[in-house]
Image (tube, coloured by chain):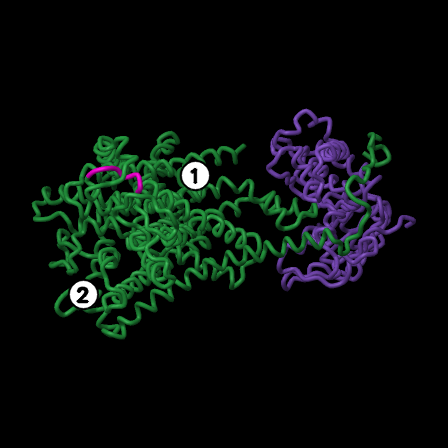
Amino acid sequence: MDNSTILETRDLNLWYGQKHALIDITVRIPKKTVTALIGPSGCGKSTLLRCCNRMNDLIDSSRITGNVLFNGEDIYDGHADAYAVREKIGMVFQKPNPFPKSIYENVAYGPRIHGVREKGALDRIVEESLKGAALWDEVKDRLHEPALALSGGQQQRLCIARSLAVEPEVILMDEPCSALDPIATGKIEDLIIRLARNYTVVIVTHNMQQAARVSEYTGFMYMGELIEFDETSRIFEDPGEELTENYITGRFG
Amino acid sequence: MKKEQAAPVPFRDFRRIRRPETGVGPSPAGATRHLVDWTVGKLLFCAALVAIAAVFFIIVFLLRDGYQIVLETGLWNFLTGAEWNPAGQHPAYGVLPLITGTLLVMALAMAIAVPLSIGSAVFIAEIAGSGTRTIIKPAIELLAGIPSVVYGFFGLILLTDWIRIGFDQPSGSSWLAGSILLAIMAIPTITSVAEDAISSVPREFREGSLALGATHWQTIKNIIVPGALSGISAAIILGMGRAIGETMAVLMVTGNAAVIPDPITNVFSPVRTLTGTLGIEMGEVAFGSTHYHALFGVAVVLLFITLVVNSTARIIVSRMQGTARSGPHRALTAAASRIPHAASAPFGRVVSPRTSQRCAFLLISLSVAIVLAALGVILAEIVVNGAGAISWEFLTGSPSDLGREGGIFPAIAGTLYLVGGALAIALPLGIATAVYLIEYTAETPLTRSIRAAVDLLNGTPSIVFGLFGFAFLVLFLGFGVSLIAGQITLGLMILPTIIRTTEEALRSIPGSFREGSYALGATKWQTISRVVLPPALPGILTGAILSIGRAAGETAPIMFTAAVFSSRFLPSSLTEPVMALPYHLFVLTTSIPGATPQSYGTAFVLLLLVLSIYLAAILVRRRYNHAKVM
């Protein structure tokens, strides 16, 4: 691993009420790569993802021990600011969730709440972000139409553009293609690969082919534990653990 | 699609437009954000406490003045004494006749309202085409918009006469008259809640039954109504709560003799209810006297009864949510076992399924027709007679000769003042409370008690608000009978409506909007104010408009707190009393002989005002529903 680490967890444990959802997770996510988290339903991969930008704070019953370091700073430290964490570490959700506003306003929302007021700057951010999410050409003539009128795949790219607009360093994606058809999925996958030139992307996916296509590193999770984490090619061609191999070859899951 | 092969699309890196690289540690900007968030949270929390405080003060003040009657007469004598005669040589304070009166009027009203309402609900939910539904549903809801004093006026002018002549009685002011009015007033409540329950029976059950060869009526009777039964019972109990708490209409038509009918089934006997007693006697009682305490005792009894009724409804509703899907399942299985039997023995039936369906639908349509006829008669009576009394002078002049001459301008303006003030108090408090309940807290003992307080306020009869306003605002705080006392009393009365509709609107905003906003680093308050509240606005607006309508038509809460009968001028400050349309109509109708045209005119103006407000709410809701589909 010659890449430097941007995101790192150390002995991370998480409980939802009595349920022990994450067990002693220690992982280092390298900078400007795509990392995939795979595993059967309920294995904790989405939970791990949500720990990385403190979205789990919103769930009252969750309790956490251990550390999550972002550029070496502990984001669960008492001094850390959850809002600043999420500004740096954006998230794209399973189901596209554009706000009931225009396309322009969806993208401009982030910069606005972080204090950008000047029209020219907002226009530029909106354009750059939509281009970054490969959506600009499709929507440039109808920026002020409602975002909900877009197709599912376009909505998801809009959500990616929306998170690009706050200039994050890491983008977490929680099964971003599970609600999309194969063509829209292909576009998002291309986009994810391109995003990795400038951003660090962590993607949770149910689809092993997707993990193989887009990621450089893959973590396999099972029952709340991180079983194996390595370069994607090794995980798929020569996994170190039997459990991983069984999952990859479709014996369970 | 291997990653090496991904087409190289030109992609510009971002220039950092906004700020230099920073970490996630403490920063001045972060500190400000957190301070704003913290402050807003605390403010909303304080607003939410107002509901609890209001309930606390209402109960304390009712008990403070009410418990003394128990000291004086003893609890048992007070509750079971058969004579209520505070003004006699030997004053007697037994509330038994009043409780009996309340229960009798309510029971007969329910006997009339329940079949009509369920018939109407079934008609709207199952039988009517979508075109008919869009007319009938708002029409029945309009019945809920007519102020109770207008019902009372209609009852006094027409209904009691019809009863007197039709049944050859010495007087039409009777138990029957009160029950008919209450039935009409309870019908919209029962119909709309029952219709919701019927409509929410899952489609599959309906289709399952029809697929077995059942007729539409068999499906309604065996599957849909049993499936919606708990919702229908809740509807009936809510209607009972509405009927028990009603003051003005009952007071104006029941004759108000504090006697137990003899025989007990004599529906033409005059009766007096708990609410009516408060409405009649509170205005004339000497402060601090035994009679005064007895009236607060009556209010406590009234509050207790409504509390029991409303909590029963709530328990049923919460049970229903748990078992909503299992009921129809059982019914469907039962129906499945019955229908083939019927089919195999077609000659064993007295009436064929088709005939019984035809009869049932006829009865159902008849009940809708009766309800619509009631609405039509009331509206026609008041519009036809009232429109004639309207003139420029009537709308812009001040009353003279005890309202027999002149106009009602001060009453119109006074009503607007009262409603405006009530809204200015209740809207911010109500929205803040709802935001706090939905967005800020999980289910904790505190939120549960806030919700319980809101429920309790919601079920409190309007006359009890009036009594509380009188004891607390007018006397204890020394506001006197004043505009501000009326505004606060009305504000408290509409607070639960605003809280509930806002809560509902906020709940309908998907959690994914909030997540999307948080994931961009937005603070709680930014998320609420920019992402959650804007789409919830139409819902909140509907709630606000409905409460305006309610506040504009209410008489009981302002009777002792704010309203005077005659005033040439508009109040120049918040501490002066005002005229108000509903109170003006009440006094004109009951105390001023020879003012019938003015009464009609006032009723017409009041009706026009309130119904146009309701119509606005219906239109807003309809536009909102269209917008949601998008």
Nearest-to-viewer mark from 1 and 2: 2
Residue A109 is covered by the magenta coloring? no
Q: Please, what is the three-letter code of the amino acid marked with disc 1? A: Glu
Instruction: Pick the residue in front: B473 or B146.
Output: B473
Quarter of the image for residue A56 reads bottom right
Q: Which chain is purple?
A: A
The magenta segment is B405-411
Residue A63 x/y as whole percent: 67, 62
Q: CA distance from mark 1 to mark 2?
A: 62 Å
Q: Are marks 1 and 2 on the same chain?
A: yes
Quarter of the image for residue A96 reads top right
Residue B218 in view here:
no
Label 1 vs 2, first from the N-terminus: 2
Viewed as shown, does residue B407 lie left or right of A9? left
Q: Locate the C terminus of chain B by quadrant.
A: top right
Instruction: Pick the residue in front: B103 or B353.
Output: B103
**Residue identifier under label 2:** B86
Count the labels in the image: 2
Q: Residue at x 68, y 52 (%)?
A: B33
Q: Residue at x 77, y 60 (%)?
A: A67
**Residue identifier under label 1:** B207
Q: Secondary structure at mark 1?
A: helix
Q: Chain of mark 1?
A: B
Give residue B224's mark: none
Instruction: Pick the residue in front: B168 or B392.
Output: B392
Please rate how many residues cluster around mark 2, counting C-alpha atoms within 10 Å: few if below 14, some from 14 to 19, many from 20: some
Look at the image and give the colour of chain B.
green
Q: Secondary structure at mark 2?
A: loop
Viewed as shown, does residue A12 lie left or right of B526? right
